[in-house]
Image: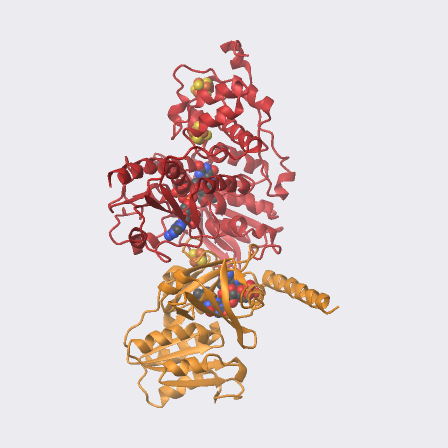
Amino acid sequence: MYEIIKAEFIAPSVKKFIIKAPKIAQKRKAGQFVIIRINENGERIPLTIADSDKELGTITIIVQGVGKTTNELNQLTTGSYITDVVGPLGKASHIENFGTAVSIGGGVGTAIAFPTAVALKDAGNYTIAIIGGRTKEFVILEDEMKKVCDEVYPTTDDGSYGFKGFVTAKLKELIDSGRKIDFVLAIGPIPMMKAVAETTRPYGIKTVVSLNPIMVDGTGMCGGCRATVDNKTVFVCVDGPEFDAHKVDFATLERRNKTYKEMEETSYHSFQCHIDKAFEEART
Amino acid sequence: MNEISKKDRMKIPRQPMPEQDKLERRTNFSEVNLGFTEELAKMEALRCLQCPKPICIEGCPVEVKISEFIKLVSEGDFLGAAQKIKEDNLLPAICGRVCPQEEQCEVKCVVGKKGEPVAIGRLERFVADFEREHTELRLPELKPKTGKRVAIVGSGPAGLSCAGDLIQMGHEVTVFEALHELGGVLIYGIPEFRLPKEIVKAEINSLRALGVEFVTNAVIGFTDTVDELLANDYDAVFIAVGAGLPYFLNIEGENLNGVYSSNEFLTRVNLMKAYRFPEFDTPVFNCKDKNVAVFGGGNTAMDAVRTSKRLGAKNAYIIYRRSDVEMPARKEEIHHAKEEGIEFILLANPKRFIGDENGWLKGVELVRMELGEPDASGRRKPIPIEGSEYILDIDMAVIAIGNGSNPIIQNTTPDLQFNKWGNISVNEETMETSKKGVFAGGDIVTGGATVILAMGAGRKAAKAINEYLSRS
Ligand SMILES: Cc1cc2nc3c(=O)[nH]c(=O)nc-3n(C[C@H](O)[C@H](O)[C@H](O)COP(=O)(O)OP(=O)(O)OC[C@H]3O[C@@H](n4cnc5c(N)ncnc54)[C@H](O)[C@@H]3O)c2cc1C
Ligand SMILES: Cc1cc2nc3c(=O)[nH]c(=O)nc-3n(C[C@H](O)[C@H](O)[C@H](O)COP(=O)(O)OP(=O)(O)OC[C@H]3O[C@@H](n4cnc5c(N)ncnc54)[C@H](O)[C@@H]3O)c2cc1C
Ligand code: SF4
Ligand code: SF4
Ligand code: FES
């Protein structure tokens, strides 16, 4: 059992957890993730290690409620426990001093991009962050990013905060302003990562994305997380999760992620009914 | 009872295994074989001729004293029989169920030369179940503590049996397991209807009672490396990580939705209990009224295809490139599969998977095969028949053509020697690797093999580790 030391919402349905996991805190590197299982009936889901504290023996994860498991997780509060946490899994981000590095996060993707942005800065890069959200309240980790990056640009789709428009528009603006950009990291929804890949491709800027296929074991044992990169099959959990954005077959990834769509809806629906019922009972 | 003559013994027919009805069992995950009753067991035991030189023992990789335990069964001393088996085999309830007896102990049995061999496996299973159901946990005596500590990586049959022996020798033992459950393939691979998980759990609990420490969610290589284990006060390490890398066919369409490796399909159903979705959260392809094809002819393929039938598949096919004679699965599994309505498409090989406009699997192109000259494995090599291609409509596919070794340990333990297939190289007598204090055994050394071979390797390693520790 793994104790939740602290849990707080940082945006609508986005919750930050600090979890006691000393071994993982010691070892983890930027880009790596854990797999958690909330309880005995739970699914195993991957979540990026956003941060860690070696002294306290804790790791930070930031979770967006999208379906049954993530919403159930987001109901847990400080002091409760998670049944299983395993990691650190996956390859660490490839970090070097590229020159100027732009880290782009879309929605909860900002949490996944954050540790790598820190590592890029530590390696001597001039570091720029573009962090997007639908509206103001979905822009997360702005203060944290500001502490480590040389420039931070929040963007919102509706212009309620920062730059109005998609993260790619901001990226394009930076490129077109004549700045020399040597490296781009983009993490977020698949359409966003695809759009970033297409934005940088004509300029030949090295671009890396972190893929989010459906996983089970996270150790290369099941092959469920396979994706197509450079026309070859890779197991994202052990060969990635980061890959060259210009070589990823995003369409296959997007399609495979829909494999359980119907069942996920069933699962989420019965979970919601359950919550509503519990809520009713608590009121009466 | 012992007065019964050899001739009369030979007249007793092999006792049938009581089974769940074949139509009914297609709809549940309960065990198919129900096990011998005491009467059936005693009767079957009488069939053993008590050969002065029991040749059956030669067929058993761990040399269970077969004739001796069967004699005790015939005398009704079932607990005594259990003790006798456990002198050589720590997991009889499991081996009695899953050993390929027809290639091991039973194939040697002299009674089998004329008729059907003595049902050694079924008796072994009966005795182990009897003991489990009729006695409190009886713990063997432990040797005085040596103060030495051994880390075991992987909790499959190799790791568990090594742990069982080492703890009795007085060493402290910690088993590290990557998954959240213990048991390796016994838990995530072999389905409930063939090996109830309660039985595996009971074995693990008795090891726990002996003092073996278990750490789940520990992927050695990531959570700790082998070197870190050695640096953290472990005097020796036994690597028993199994063959955990699924092979694919490498043909067109393999990444379509609905194509699984057997590891993924079985893990979802067995380990994650997807057959009880939505009570359990993990989903699996909804097989109901669908056509399912499983590629391969081993135990894994049989397990996958029978699982799909239980999940409601309308048509469930085994597609195998050789003929049924070459099929490596246990005979009993093939027989059960046929009884359950599995269709066997033999001498056929997939060429490509075909998807619909949304990327879901809808068919497979097969080519007919014929058998040519024997290949290196001694089996006749299948050769495609030019122009015999045809398309079979399927909605889900499971690839069960074998497993390789997972590279995590290899990538994180630079001075450990591996062979060209990625298996750890060991001294076959001692299971010692090229790295001091590190031993290995089970599927990671042999490639995918059997439970009893993995168990035997674990015991051999325990002996060698004990010697190594008393020297150091
Ligand atoms: C390496 C990696 C790191 C990730 N890091 C984070 C993170 O830091 N924060 C965060 O909020 N999310 C992260 N995710 C995504 C997160 O794992 C999914 O949102 C979560 O699994 C959804 O589960 P659910 O039951 O709530 O939703 P569901 O309704 O079950 O599924 C919603 C969608 O999530 C995906 N999904 C479903 N099951 C799984 C699974 N077992 N494994 C992976 N994806 C699945 C599918 O695309 C599905 O369509 C990461 C994913 C990967 C692969
Ligand atoms: C579906 C299926 C059906 C089978 N049916 C039969 C049968 O009927 N009869 C028979 O005799 N044999 C059968 N086999 C084969 C048999 O199960 C194996 O030969 C046997 O389990 C091998 O034992 P093992 O201890 O070497 O490895 P495994 O049982 O594979 O156990 C290895 C364990 O190590 C863990 N592990 C892996 N990497 C790490 C790591 N880095 N750190 C920590 N832990 C790790 C794994 O999670 C796993 O739990 C079957 C196999 C399968 C897949
Ligand atoms: S362990 Fe397996 S091979 Fe040996 S006697 Fe028992 S069933 Fe036969
Ligand atoms: S060979 Fe057959 S008959 Fe002879 S001792 Fe073994 S089991 Fe009994
Ligand atoms: S999640 Fe199973 S191989 Fe990657």
Q: Which one of the lettered chains is coloured red?
A: B
Question: How far from the left and from the top, in percent, is residue B52?
Answer: 40, 14
The type of colouring in the image is: by chain
| Residue closest to the far bottom | A177
**Picture quarter containing residue B171?**
top left
Q: Residue B427's spot in the image, x, y percent?
A: 26, 39
Front position in the image: B66 or B267: B66
Q: Quadrant of ligand 2?
A: top left
Q: Is residue A257 at least partly visible in the picture?
A: no
Using residue B457 as the reference point, say whether residue B262 is left or right of it.
right
Q: Is residue A24 left or right of residue B230?
A: right
Frontmost residue, A16 versus B194: A16
Query: Quick one: which residue is furthest to the front in this view?
Result: B144
Report x, y in % for residue A93: 35, 69
Q: Nearer the viewer, residue B407 or B251?
A: B407
Q: Residue at x 52, y 88 (%)?
A: A159
Residue A148 visible to the viewer: yes
Q: Quadrant of the C terminus of chain A?
A: bottom right
Q: Residue furthest right?
A: A284
Residue B103: where, in percent of width, then height? 42, 29
Above or below, B352 relative to B317: below
Residue B156 quadrant: top left
- Left or right side of B444 for A47: right
Q: How many marks?
A: 0
- Colour of chain A, in one word, is orange
